[in-house]
Image (spheres, rainbow, N blue to C red):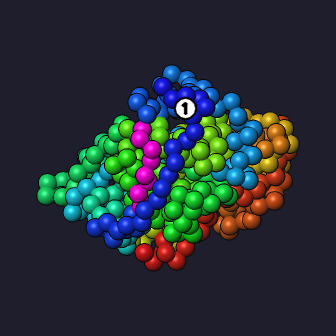
């Protein structure tokens, strides 16, 4: 068991190159302690658990929220799914299974992509890392089995593709906040700073591989770290020792709502498509055939998106499912609720953005949500229009 007063392991960084031509780094950690499991480390740092899930809180929710605004937090997202797609046809395969253009990606790069059904409705938002011998796909916890089964279902005879679930053998940590770049620089991975979403490098720690990727999961500077489960505890201590403030699920949920990051069973359901969910940066409508492409292309070509995801700055509390109205007319529905840093209520909701055949501006519009007044506001995670890359990919 780790002593509560023990210092975090020191880190020494060595630059090298690996055969995928991706920059690689080496974390020379102190010798791992015996039985230094991730859960024991989290418990020593005050983690509060419910059953076998992730830490709900570290008893520091206000401190973590402040660190997200002015410093850096670290979140244990190891309960999220991690699938590895291998084989010579892996890029072509994922190209046809989700919304992003995989054929344009090279090792060391990555992207966000959306898994949709045949009607173009959302199943999950995933983060993908293209490596030399495989693609790592990070999916929502409740979609791990569903997406793995779906991918297996679409592997046909002759396809050189294999799907592996590496969730149980790895950990996933997310860094977020304005000082996350400083922490990454301190670890010797400054070459990642300013990189595109999904840009990543391979590390080594205690003889095990570690992958660090640019991941603005909350619409602000941040990184994802995937490592072997066996070194998860020591790696977590190292990050906290470098100044990252632990954040639990309560803090993550508040932060993702304020950022406008859509979540499964809230904003990502079979009622909505990724253009409505403001995930346009993850969608190509001209890359060629993929599941759901026909619907999304039609919506884009006709400029026919009728509703989009917005933030709602509320004057009083509201509930998921409350109607958003403009006078006496329903124009939307609330999908998620949170509190702002000062305690004021905030919501996410789908709002009708088309009237009489034309798109209408919504930012700053005053509306009613349940019994509360509200102002429609933009959220940092949202991308509302298809870029030249997503259109011409």
Q: Is residue 172 left or right of residue 49?
A: left
Q: Is residue 315 above or below residue 183?
A: above
Residue 152: x and y in percent read: 26, 46
Is 387 or 233 nearer to us in this picture? 233
Residue 178: x and y in percent read: 68, 58
Is 203 or 102 nearer to us in this picture? 203
Q: Is residue 96 left or right of residue 37?
A: left
Q: Quadrant of the C terminus?
A: bottom left
Residue sitting at 76 percent across and 49 percent down? 312
Q: Is residue 70 above or below residue 149?
A: below
Q: Is residue 70 above or below residue 92?
A: above
Q: SS of the residue at dot 1?
A: helix
Residue 309: x and y in percent read: 64, 53
Task: List the residue tagged with mark 1.
Answer: 42
Residue sitting at 57 percent across and 69 percent down? 194
Our reading of the magenta stretch's main secondary structure is: loop
Q: Is residue 132 above or below residue 157?
A: below
Q: Is residue 127 left or right of residue 373?
A: left
Q: Which residues are magenta?
A: 25-32
Q: Quadrant of residue 290?
A: bottom left
Q: Residue furthest top?
A: 51
Q: Is residue 382 visible?
A: no
């Amino acid at each position: 068991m780790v002593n509560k007063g023990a210092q975090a392991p020191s880190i020494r960084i060595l630059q090298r190159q690996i055969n995928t031509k991706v920059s690689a780094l080496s974390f020379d950690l102190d010798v791992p302690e015996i039985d230094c499991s991730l859960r024991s480390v989290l418990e020593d740092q005050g983690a509060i658990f419910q059953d076998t899930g992730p830490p709900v809180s570290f008893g520091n929710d206000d401190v973590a929220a402040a660190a997200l605004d002015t410093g850096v937090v670290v979140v244990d997202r190891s309960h999220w799914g991690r699938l590895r797609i291998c084989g010579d046809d892996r890029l072509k395969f994922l190209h046809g299974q989700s919304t992003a253009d995989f054929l344009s990606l090279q090792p060391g790069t990555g992207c966000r992509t959306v898994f949709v059904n045949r009607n173009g409705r959302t199943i999950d938002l995933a983060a993908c890392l293209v490596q030399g011998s495989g693609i790592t796909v990070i999916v929502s916890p409740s979609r791990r089995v569903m997406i793995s089964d779906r991918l297996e279902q679409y592997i046909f005879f002759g396809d050189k593709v294999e799907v592996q679930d590496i969730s149980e053998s790895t950990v996933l940590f997310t860094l977020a906040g304005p000082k996350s770049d400083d922490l990454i620089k301190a670890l010797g991975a400054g070459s990642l700073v300013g990189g595109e979403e999904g840009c990543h490098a391979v590390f080594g720690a205690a003889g095990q591989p570690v992958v660090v990727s640019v991941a603005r999961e909350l619409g602000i500077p941040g990184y994802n770290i995937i490592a072997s489960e066996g070194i998860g505890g020591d790696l977590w201590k190292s990050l906290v020792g470098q100044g990252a403030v632990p954040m639990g699920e309560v803090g993550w949920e508040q932060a993702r709502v304020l950022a406008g990051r859509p979540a499964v069973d809230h904003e990502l359901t079979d009622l909505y498509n990724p253009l409505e969910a403001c995930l346009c940066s993850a969608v190509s409508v001209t890359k060629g055939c993929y599941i759901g492409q026909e619907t999304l292309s039609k919506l884009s070509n006709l400029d026919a998106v009728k509703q989009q995801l917005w933030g709602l700055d509320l004057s009083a509390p509201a509930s998921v499912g409350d109607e958003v109205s403009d006078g006496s007319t329903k124009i939307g529905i609330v999908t998620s609720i949170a509190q702002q840093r000062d305690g004021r209520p905030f919501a996410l909701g789908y709002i009708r953005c088309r009237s009489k055949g034309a798109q209408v501006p919504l930012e700053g519009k005053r509306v009613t949500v349940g019994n509360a007044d509200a102002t429609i506001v933009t959220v940092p995670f949202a991308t509302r229009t298809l870029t030249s890359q997503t259109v011409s990919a």
